[in-house]
């Protein structure tokens, strides 16, 4: 039960990957540019999260659905997967609407 959130994030990302594959929107259109774009977006949100945690705005709150693996105080490992999902879905939406 503790990995349910991570499993949900991975399934959602896999669904986005299938959509990307079918319509060749991002990763299957230009792999290098997509990886760079996702890395920049994730890095910006990591900085955002770290600042929010340092200012006492963001906190984990404890959940039975997370693994309990922490990358830092109040920063669970699932956050990286969530940020990837967020950036990937935004990129696919942008590419889908501009295509």
Image (cartoon, rainbow, N blue to C red):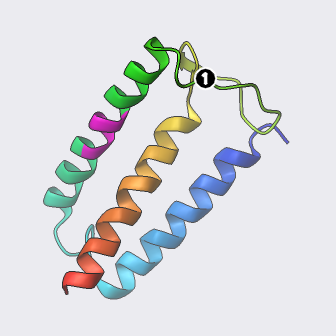
Report the residue at 38% width, 20% height from top: 51
In percent of width and height, residue 83 lies at 44, 45
Q: Does the magenta stretch include residue 43?
A: yes
Report the residue at 46% width, 55% height from top: 85
Classed neighbour count for the residue bearing mark 1: other residues with Cα under 10 Å, few (<14), some (14–19), many (≥20): some
- Counting every numbered tag in the picture gives 1
In percent of width and height, residue 97 lies at 26, 83
Picture quadrant of residue 31: bottom left
Is the N terminus in the top left, top right, bottom left or bottom right quadrant? top right
In percent of width and height, residue 30 lies at 16, 68
Residue 87 left/right relative to 57: left
Asked if 48 appears above or below 92 in the picture, the reply is above
Picture quadrant of residue 70: top right
Question: Nearest the camera: 65 or 18?
Answer: 65
Q: Does the magenta stretch include residue 82?
A: no
Provide the residue designation for mark 1.
59
Asked if 37 appears above or below 31 in the picture, the reply is above
Is the C terminus in the top left, top right, bottom left or bottom right quadrant? bottom left
Residue 96 left/right relative to 98: right
Residue 15 left/right relative to 28: right
- Badge 1 element: loop
Residue 45 left/right relative to 83: left
In percent of width and height, residue 40 lies at 21, 42
- Over which residues does the magenta segment extend? 41-45
Magenta stretch secondary structure, dominant: helix
Asked if 62 appears above or below 65 in the picture, the reply is above
């Amino acid at each position: 039960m503790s990995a349910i959130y991570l499993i949900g994030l991975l399934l959602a990302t896999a669904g986005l990957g299938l959509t990307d594959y079918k319509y060749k929107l991002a990763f299957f259109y230009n792999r290098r540019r997509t990886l760079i774009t996702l890395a920049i977006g994730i890095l910006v949100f990591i900085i955002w999260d770290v600042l929010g945690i340092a200012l006492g705005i963001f906190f984990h709150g404890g959940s039975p659905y997370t693994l309990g693996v922490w990358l830092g105080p109040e920063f669970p490992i699932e956050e990286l997967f969530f940020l990837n999902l967020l950036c990937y879905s935004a990129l696919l939406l942008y590419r889908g609407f501009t295509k």
